[in-house]
Image: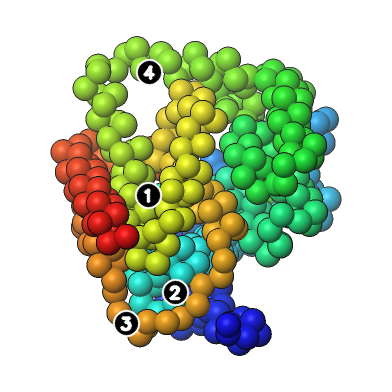
Amino acid sequence: MPNRAAMESQREPLLDWPGALLVLLVAVLQFFRGGWAGFACWKPGVLSTLCVDPYWINQWLKNYAGGFTKRGLIGEVLRQLFPSGVDLVWLNAIAVVQLMAIALLLYGLMRVLLARGGLPPLLLSVLLLLAPFGKSLAETALDPLQLCVLLVSAVLFTPPRSALRDATVLVAFLLCSLIYEGCALLLLPVGYWLMRPLLWRWLPVVFAALLLLIFQQQDLPSLGMAAKDALAAVNPFTGEQIRYQDGGGLAASVSFSFNVKQEFSRYLSDSPRDTVSRIARSLGAVLVYALALWTAMGSKRPEERRMAGLIWLSWAPVALPFVLITHDWLRYGVVLLLLTLVVTVAQLPQCSQSEPWWQLSRPEAWAAGVLVMAVVVGPMTSDVRKFLPPDLFYASLLMLAVASTVALLESRRLQRLR
């Protein structure tokens, strides 16, 4: 048998610098191409928000000055660190850095999923970033959910089935739930898959029940006023200020029942065809990405694909409430796919290099072809936070049909080869 130390030395690192630099470049280009205002946001005399959607800045400014409330943790930390005000330039820089970190995370996940370095994981990562997958992330730069994904990814640096991993999952669960209250539900599969089957494994469920009970009520107006007075974001170039703005329809402040009523009214006003179209252009598009990656795993991880599929499906029960009470379907789908990849990779052994770096296996080539199709179909300018534009309905159906056919054919071929 080969020496274990020798095997360890053959393992690929989580990242390689040439590939990482290219991924970072693509992420930055996507940020300015598909972000809130593109390059125009840096012109003199621009609005005080600079390059980031003010919706996300508003969520970062919410704090605990008036008392404990949902989504207030980030703002409270900023309030303690910068009591005189937050520099908007730094918030914009954080938005870019957060997107770059997500891009590096994606590249590292691809390298482990494909159990190799070289061209295939780099190609799939770049194609995902250029597709509406990456455009959605760029348009929602500074989204607290992206920060939560990065916090959960800390489990990748902990030993499997260890007390350290259990503690990391619990800390990430609590922090993320205080950053975005929906994580109390959204992260339940993380604890189920990554924590040891001990009594501790039920703590996320207990925390989720308690937090949802606390957060299900609408915020008092006094909380919003106190948060507004306690912290400001200042544009040093124009002197303009942004303060937290509370409102009756703001998801961060209203009750869950309000969100349910608001979204269900939209469903009732839509025709069945409109609803099907929205599903195909959002959840269908995310399924295309998932099927492409699932196909690519057949080159080196055919056995692990079943586990990846089960992990993906395990998110369906907790994701359903978000589909029913929100309209950012594509955004949530991208985040859920990233979380699925993190949980899957956390349970896989590290990759080792065996093939030439430029060589693409058949499953990897098919997966790349599906993602190239998604890049070509994906809109250059339209907002894809919710779903692809209406005129891409039939294109979305075609992509889903092709991705499903490729995944099915490759699965049957791999079964015959066994």
Mark 4 vs mark 1, CA separation in Å: 28 Å
Q: Residue 300's quadrant in the figure?
A: bottom left
Front disc: 4 or 3? 3
**Circle 2 residues within 10 Å: few <14, some 14–19, many ≥20:** many
Secondary-structure class at tag 3 = loop
Q: Amino acid at mark 4?
A: Arg
Q: Identify the amino acid type marked 1.
A: Ala
The residue pinned by badge 4 equals 266
Answer with mark 1 or mark 3, whichever residue precedes in sequence: 1
Label 4 vs label 1, nearer the camera? 1
N-terminal of the pair, mark 2 or mark 4, is 2
Whether residue 363 sits left or right of residue 43 in the image: it is: left
Mark 1 Cα-neighbour bin, 10 Å: few <14, some 14–19, many ≥20? many
Tell me the amino acid under the disc marked 2.
Arg
Q: Provide the residue designation for mark 1.
A: 290
The answer to whether the residue labelled 4 contacts the one labelled 1, judged by CB atoms less than 8 Å apart, is: no
**Label 2 to label 4, Cα distance in Å?**
46 Å
Of the two numbered discs 2 and 1 in the rendering, the one whose residue sits closer to the viewer: 2
> Are circles 2 and 4 on residues that touch, CB within 8 Å?
no
**Which of pointers 2 and 3 indicates the residue nearer the eye?**
2
Q: What residue did someone put label 3 on?
A: 358
| 104 versus 310 height, above or below | below
Image position, residue 125 (x, y; %): 40, 65
Measured Cα–Cα span from mark 2 to mark 3: 11 Å
Q: Is residue 400 visible?
A: yes
**Could you tell which of marks 4 and 1 lies nearer the N-terminus?**
4
